[in-house]
Image (cartoon, rainbow, N blue to C red):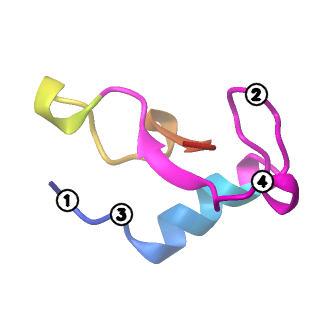
Protein backbone atom coordinates (compact mmCIF):
# COMPACT_ATOMS: atom_id res chain seq x y z
CA UNK A 1 0.00 0.00 0.00
CA UNK A 2 1.46 3.35 -0.96
CA UNK A 3 0.95 6.52 1.01
CA UNK A 4 -0.82 9.29 -0.91
CA UNK A 5 1.42 12.39 -0.97
CA UNK A 6 0.00 15.46 0.79
CA UNK A 7 0.02 17.70 -2.34
CA UNK A 8 -1.96 15.04 -4.25
CA UNK A 9 -4.42 14.67 -1.35
CA UNK A 10 -4.98 18.42 -1.30
CA UNK A 11 -5.48 18.44 -5.07
CA UNK A 12 -8.20 15.77 -4.80
CA UNK A 13 -9.92 17.54 -1.89
CA UNK A 14 -9.84 20.84 -3.78
CA UNK A 15 -11.23 19.24 -6.94
CA UNK A 16 -14.10 17.80 -4.89
CA UNK A 17 -14.75 21.16 -3.23
CA UNK A 18 -14.48 19.32 0.13
CA UNK A 19 -17.60 17.26 -0.66
CA UNK A 20 -17.89 13.50 -1.09
CA UNK A 21 -17.57 12.79 -4.79
CA UNK A 22 -20.16 10.00 -4.51
CA UNK A 23 -22.98 11.52 -2.45
CA UNK A 24 -21.94 15.23 -2.45
CA UNK A 25 -22.12 15.46 1.37
CA UNK A 26 -19.91 18.35 2.51
CA UNK A 27 -17.10 17.36 4.85
CA UNK A 28 -18.31 19.98 7.35
CA UNK A 29 -21.66 18.17 7.75
CA UNK A 30 -20.23 14.70 8.16
CA UNK A 31 -19.71 13.13 11.59
CA UNK A 32 -16.49 11.49 10.34
CA UNK A 33 -13.92 13.21 8.14
CA UNK A 34 -13.85 12.27 4.48
CA UNK A 35 -10.91 10.34 3.07
CA UNK A 36 -9.00 10.28 -0.17
CA UNK A 37 -9.30 6.75 -1.52
CA UNK A 38 -8.49 4.80 -4.68
CA UNK A 39 -11.35 4.21 -7.14
CA UNK A 40 -9.58 1.14 -8.52
CA UNK A 41 -7.70 -0.51 -5.67
CA UNK A 42 -3.94 -0.82 -5.87
CA UNK A 43 -4.22 -4.59 -5.60
CA UNK A 44 -6.15 -4.45 -8.88
CA UNK A 45 -3.38 -2.35 -10.44
CA UNK A 46 -5.00 1.03 -9.74
CA UNK A 47 -2.57 3.93 -9.72
CA UNK A 48 -2.02 6.59 -7.10
CA UNK A 49 -2.87 9.46 -9.43
CA UNK A 50 -5.47 12.22 -9.34
CA UNK A 51 -7.65 10.49 -11.94
CA UNK A 52 -7.88 7.32 -9.82
CA UNK A 53 -8.44 8.99 -6.46
CA UNK A 54 -11.71 10.17 -4.98
CA UNK A 55 -12.71 12.20 -1.93
CA UNK A 56 -15.21 10.02 -0.12
CA UNK A 57 -17.32 9.83 3.02
CA UNK A 58 -16.56 6.35 4.28
Q: Nearer the viewer, residue 33 or 55?
A: 33
The reply to whether discs 1 and 3 touch (Cβ–Cβ < 8 Å) is: yes
Secondary structure found at label 2: loop
User: Which residue is identified by label 1?
Assistant: 2
Q: Residues within 10 Å of mark 2 (few under 14, many from 20)?
A: few
User: Which residue is identified by label 3?
Assistant: 4
Name the front one of labels 3 and 2. 2
Rendered location of residue 30, percent (x, y): 77, 53
Residue at 44 percent across and 45 percent down: it is: 37
Secondary structure found at label 4: loop
Q: Is residue 14 left or right of residue 1?
A: right
User: Which residue is identified by label 2?
Assistant: 23
The reply to whether discs 1 and 4 touch (Cβ–Cβ < 8 Å) is: no
Q: Earlier in the sequence, mark 1 or mark 2?
A: 1
Q: Give the CA distance from mark 4 to mark 2.
A: 11 Å
Name the front one of labels 4 and 2. 4
Q: Quadrant of residue 25?
A: top right
Name the front one of labels 1 and 4. 4
Task: Please give the range of residues in magenta.
Answer: 15-40
Name the front one of labels 1 and 2. 2
Rendered location of residue 7, percent (x, y): 52, 73
Secondary structure found at label 3: loop
Amino acid sequence: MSKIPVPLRLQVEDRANNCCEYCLLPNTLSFYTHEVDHVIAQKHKGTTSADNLTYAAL
